[in-house]
Amino acid sequence: MEIKKAGIIGAGTMGNGIAQVFAQSGLGVVLNDVSDAILDKALANIGGSMDRLIKKEKITAADKDAALKRITKSTDLKAVADCDIVIEAIIEDFEAKKKTFQSLDAVCKPGAILASNTSSISITRLAACTKRPQQVIGMHFMNPVPMMALAEIVRGLATSDEVYKATDELARKVGKTPVETRDYPGFVSNRVLMPMINEACYTLMEGVASRDAIDTVMKLGMAHPMGPLQLADLIGLDVCLSIMEVLYEGFSDSKYRPCPLLKNMVAAGHLGRKTKKGFYSYE
C-alpha cells in the first residue's frame, strides 16, 4: 500500500503540523477545515514554521516553496476522496470524531486508510463507525509535530497487518519514529503523562507547593524540559481534561479522577497558551 497523497481533516495546531511534515517529505496534501479563514491561518503558520527552519539552515527557501505547493486547501470533504490516507485531527470529542469518520467512510476511495490523531479515544470504537474497520488506525503525533520525533501507531481490534505496515512505513517516510501500541485508553503517552499533569494540579490545589515550585522540582529533579503545569498550558487544559475523562471512564479507577482545579479552570475558559491564560499568563 504505497501512500503518495494524504488528507488532513482539521487545520489547527496538530493538523497544520502534520500537513507540514508530510508536504516537506514529498507527499501531496489536502488540508481540510470548515472555513477559508482557518485554512489561511494554518498555511501562514506552516510558512512561519518553515521560515524558522530556514533560519536554522535545516531547509532552504526552495524546499519551503516546493512544500507549500504540495498543499491544497479545501472546505469540501470530498476533496480528500482520492487520498491514500486521511488523518483526522479535529477536537478530542468522540461524537465529533464519529461523525467525521462516517463522512470519510462515505467519500473516500475503497482502499484508503482512515487514521486518527486522537490522543486517547478508542480506535476500535471509531473503526466500528465505518464499513472498513480493518482500514482504521491511530496515528498519534506529538506537539509540535515538526519538532517531535514520536508517532504512536495504534492498532484497533480489527486493524489489518497490511494497514499497520503501511502506516508504520509512512511515519518513517515523514521522519518520525513509530511505536506500536494497543488500543487502551490514553495508549502509552497520555496514560503515563496525563496522570502526572493531573497530580501536579492536585499538588497545587492542595497547597503542597506553588506553581513555580512544582514545575521547578520536575525540571531540575527529573530533567524534564518543562514543568507539568507549563506543559498543561502548552497542550491546552481542555485537552488535558478530555483525556483524563477518557481515562477515568475507560478504567473506572479513581486514580484517573480529573482534578477539580483543572475542571474549574476549563469551566472559566482558562485553557493555557491558546487563551493567553492558564496556570501562567501569556499576554
Image: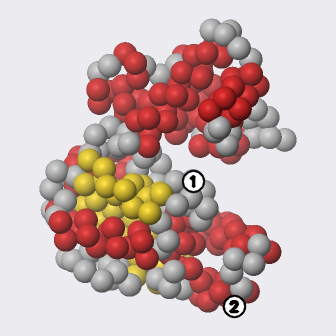
Mark 1 residue crowding within 10 angstroms, few (<14) / some (14–19) / many (20+): some
| Image-based side of 52 in relation to 221, left or right | right
Residue 101 image-quadrant placement = bottom left
- 113, above or below 181, in the image: below
Could you say which disc has been placed on residue 143 in the image?
1
Q: Which amino acid type is marked by label 2?
A: Ala
| Image-based side of 206 in relation to 128, left or right | right
Q: Which element type, helix, strand or loop, lies under badge 1? A: loop
Q: Residue at x 69, y 34 (%)?
A: 219
- 182, above or below 257, in the image: below
The one nearer the camera, 170 or 240, is 170
Q: Which element type, helix, strand or loop, lies under badge 2? A: helix
Q: Residue at x 38, y 42 (%)?
A: 188
Q: Which amino acid type is marked by label 1?
A: Asn
Q: Residue 86, image x and y in percent?
A: 36, 69
Mark 2 residue crowding within 10 angstroms, few (<14) / some (14–19) / many (20+): few
Q: Determine which residue is flagged by label 2.
A: 62
Residue 177: in sight, yes or no? Answer: yes
